[in-house]
Image (cartoon, rainbow, N blue to C red):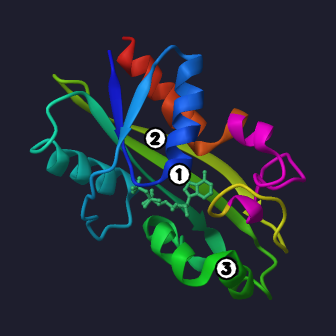
Amino acid sequence: MKLTFITGNQHKFREAERILKEYNVIIGRKDINCEEIRSESCEEVALTCLRLLRRKVNKPFFVEDSGLFIKALDGFPGTLSSWVFKKIGNEGILKLLREEQIRDAYFLSAIAVWDGRKEKVLIGRVDGYISRELRGKGFGYDPIFIPAGSEKTFGEDEKIKSLCSHRRNSLKKLAEWIGR
Ligand code: ITT
């Protein structure tokens, strides 16, 4: 089955393409803007977007809503991650946490998929914490997120990211669901 990933984010697409290939799932990309609802739940945002796009798209496709949830900030930026990144970037997040000792955070990825018959939501999560300074490359919050058990940020260690990221976990579930 040819599956389309509808996203405006080329980094997310490239990660998904590479990971899903390992599970023999080949994807294409389409960028159709989906007005995101205001909700604290990635799951709800992804599912609402899927249902809106189902009116326009007549083939199997999926969308993904992801975000970084920081404990000391009550889950901020969460589902606002994309907007907050554009506004204040990683430097802004580090400033907000300057005095903070508790730096726990997690990334969530919620995939909502339509296979032509059924819809499904699949969630992936990775726990970790926020670094004290920017380290490495990657995209979005990669240079400030350190997964639990590592010393390096996702931006410094692409391999670790590929093995344990929130997106790896949700995409693995997606591949299993597609192949069921
Ligand atoms: P689409 O909605 O078009 O797919 P988007 O970039 O707006 O693209 P999201 O609404 O899911 O996607 O925004 C999530 C934001 O969270 C994203 O723009 C990044 O800033 C950040 N983010 C998500 N996954 C990330 C990752 O693996 N590494 C670093 N930052 C990430």
The image position of residue 178, as x and y in percent, is: 36, 18
Q: CA distance from mark 1 to mark 3?
A: 17 Å
Task: Report the quarter where the C terminus lies.
Answer: top left
Asked which secondary structure carries label 3, the reply is helix
Q: Which residue is mark 2?
A: 123
Q: Residues within 10 Å of mark 3 (few under 14, many from 20)?
A: some
* For discs 1 and 3, the disc positioned in front in the rendered view: 3
Query: Nearest the camera: 11 or 178?
Result: 11
* For discs 3 and 2, the disc positioned in front in the rendered view: 3
Q: State if disc 2 and disc 1 touch (CB < 8 Å).
A: yes
Residue 113 appears in the picture as rendered: no
Q: Amino acid at mark 1?
A: Leu
Left or right, 38 with respect to 103, comes to left
Q: Which residue is mark 1?
A: 108
The image position of residue 85, as x and y in percent, is: 56, 73
Is residue 69 depicted above or below 152 in this figure?
below
Q: Who's the residue at 23% across and 45% down the image?
A: 50
Left or right, 113 with respect to 128, comes to left
Task: Report if the beta carbon of the residue with label 2 is closer than 8 angstroms to ligand 1.
Answer: no
Tell me, for residue 24, which label it has, or none.
none
Q: Residue furthest left?
A: 55
Residue 80 appears in the picture as rendered: yes
Task: Report the quarter where the N terminus lies.
Answer: top left
Is residue 113 depicted above or below 94 in this figure?
above
Q: CA distance from mark 3 to mark 2?
A: 24 Å
The image position of residue 117, as x and y in percent, is: 16, 22
Q: Who's the residue at 50% across and 32% down the image?
A: 171
Asked which secondary structure carries label 2, the reply is strand
Q: Residue furthest right?
A: 151
What is the magenta range?
142-162
Q: Which residue is mark 3?
A: 93
